[in-house]
Image (spheres, rainbow, N blue to C red):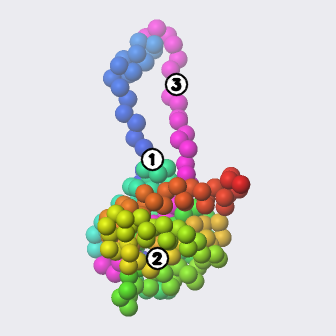
Amino acid sequence: MRLVPGGRGPEIDVDADVLGAAAELLDAGATVSTMEIDAPVAGRALVVVVDDRTAHGGIDSLGPLVTELLTEAGFLVDASVSVQADEVEIRNALNTAVIGGVDLVISVGGTGMSPRDVTPEATSQVLDRELPGISEALRSSGRVAGSLDAGLSRGVAGVSGSTLVVNLPGTRSAIRDGMATLGPLASRVIGELSGLVE
């Protein structure tokens, strides 16, 4: 298992005119202090990449993509974890995320039809309740976008404790389309689980 720390917070570019104005205020004897702006966070998330090569030190091209899309959606990504296509390893990674209290776990890869594609089976063992509507929406939007992988995905989605767990196919196009579809659904589920939405 490989663990890659999540991304940093957003960087803020300060305009040269703003710096000049601050310097003038300082010269005039004014006190200038910095202010931290807390952007609303949609929740904490963790990414699980199911791929034998990545788990053994290969270049991970999917984890950073999911992390980027989650960050754009307002999530704070704790980490991206790479595991082998092994039912026990996948289940352990998902359970660790749930116990860690993240709001959303996105797994990518292992949702197809080969004997090594066991992500749905491992995920089902972790879930308290399945949410088939999310899986159906992901497959449907993928098919509309022309993705054959989305139509063949056996990925599942559901709730474990107070964590939403979602499987996505392991291709960049399926991830991009899936994340676009998942965003509002995940926000609704997380809101209901946290008691913010009635």
Q: Nearer the viewer, residue 195 or 154?
A: 154
Q: Which residues are magenta?
A: 27-55
Residue under the image location 58 percent in, 83 percent down: 125
* Residue 115 visible somewhere in the drawing: yes
- Mark 3 and mark 2 in contact? Answer it, CB < 8 Å: no
Residue ID for mark 1:
9
Circle 2 sits on which residue? 155
Residue 96 seen by the camera:
no
Residue at mark 3: 33
Residue drawn at 38 percent across, 75 percent down: 151
For residue 36, above or below residue 30: below
Which amino acid is tagged 3? Ser
Which residue is nearer to you in this view: 112 or 55?
112
Q: Position of residue 170 (x, y in %)?
A: 35, 72
Binning the other alpha carbons within 10 Å of mark 1 as few (below 14), some (14 to 19) or many (20 upward) gives: few
Q: For the residue labelled by badge 1, is the local secondary structure a helix, a strand or a loop?
A: loop
Label 2 close to label 1 by CB (< 8 Å): no
Q: Name the kind of residue labelled 2 in the image.
A: Gly
Give the residue at the far left of this rendering.
59
Is residue 47 magenta-colored?
yes
Q: Earlier in the sequence, mark 3 or mark 2?
A: 3
Mark 1 or 3, nearer chain start: 1
Amino acid type assigned to the residue bearing label 1 in the image: Gly
Q: Nearer the viewer, residue 194 or 12?
A: 194
| Alpha carbon distance from label 2 to label 1 | 30 Å
Residue 139 in the magenta stretch? The answer is: no
| Count of number-bearing discs | 3
Q: Nearer the viewer, mark 3 or mark 2?
A: 2
